[in-house]
Amino acid sequence: MATPHIEVNDKNLFAKTVLMPGDPLRAEYIAKTYLTDVVKINNVRNMFAFTGYYKGKKITVMGSGMGMPSIGIYSYELFNVYGVENIIRIGSCGSYSKDVNVYDVIIVKDAYSESSYAKVAYGYEENVQKGSDELFAKLNESAKKLGYPVINERIHSSDVFYRAHGNVFTDVRDAYGCVAVEMESFALFANARYLNKKAACVLTVSDSLVTNEVTTSEERQNSFNRMMEIALEAAE
Ligand code: HPA
């Protein structure tokens, strides 16, 4: 049962719900800060995974790495080999909109991408992929209960971070209505769709391509903590 990327040999070491930050050290921070009875279950490529309990609920936190190829591999194996039912990506994004500010939290409605991932993998022609309506609703309920304001909009899952022509984001924003950019959700949503599993994505805005504002590490941590609470409370 171990895969080339995950050394776990017992399905039960994974919870049914996995929270996926991009950075494996973030996964470690989350496990240590929010979970009890934590066990580290994966070390391959330092893509750490931890399983523990949040208010009695069994939860796994695992890094996804950056970009669609990376989250595509890990989420596929979690869903298909380890019986994981729900993956909630918790990440950061850059704002494309003057109405979306640094530190805002976005519960992603759906993701546009120019990526060929969904077409190559599954023959899906649509350039917008969407996660689970049920998880989306749960995350929104959770934010409401906690009293944290959130944005529900479309985002751009980009295949590239650096471009020859700096600020090309306005084309994508205006053509597809994307309010922010990250690099993973489209592939995660396509995998969940194909495998009949549930996926969702919560993002904090870490930078703005409109104002070029950058965040301070303290404030980043605060908005990150809000996003984490929303995801943990929504997890089954
Ligand atoms: N581009 C792509 N992904 C990102 C960004 C960005 O500006 N900020 C956070 N994730």
Image (cartoon, rainbow, N blue to C red):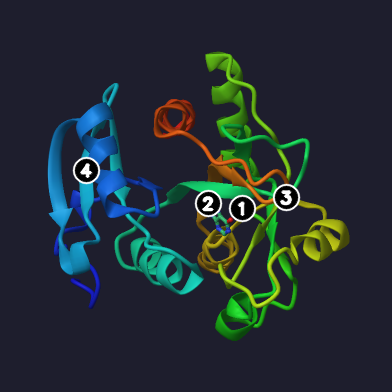
Q: Which residue is mark 2?
A: 199
Q: Type of residue at label 1? A: Gly
First in sequence: mark 2 or mark 4?
A: 4
Q: Is residue 9 left or right of residue 96?
A: left
In three-dimensional space, the C-alpha distance between marks 2 and 4, rounded to whole angstroms, equals 18 Å
Q: Which residue is mark 3?
A: 96
Q: Type of residue at label 2? A: Ala
The residue lying toward the viewer, choosing from 50 and 167, is 167
SS under mark 1 = loop
Q: Which residue is mark 4?
A: 51
SS under mark 2 = strand
Q: Residue at x 61, y 19 (%)?
A: 144
First in sequence: mark 4 or mark 1?
A: 4
In three-dimensional space, the C-alpha distance between marks 2 and 3, rounded to whole angstroms, equals 23 Å
Q: Is residue 124 left or right of residue 77?
A: right
The residue lying toward the viewer, choosing from 86 and 22, is 22
Q: Residues within 10 Å of mark 2 (few under 14, many from 20)?
A: many
Numbered circle sitting on residue 61: none
SS under mark 3 = loop
SS under mark 4 = strand
* Quarter placement of the N terminus: bottom left
Q: Which residue is mark 1?
A: 131
In three-dimensional space, the C-alpha distance between marks 4 and 3, rounded to whole angstroms, equals 35 Å
Q: Type of residue at label 3? A: Tyr
The residue at label 4 has a CB less than 8 Å from ligand 1:
no
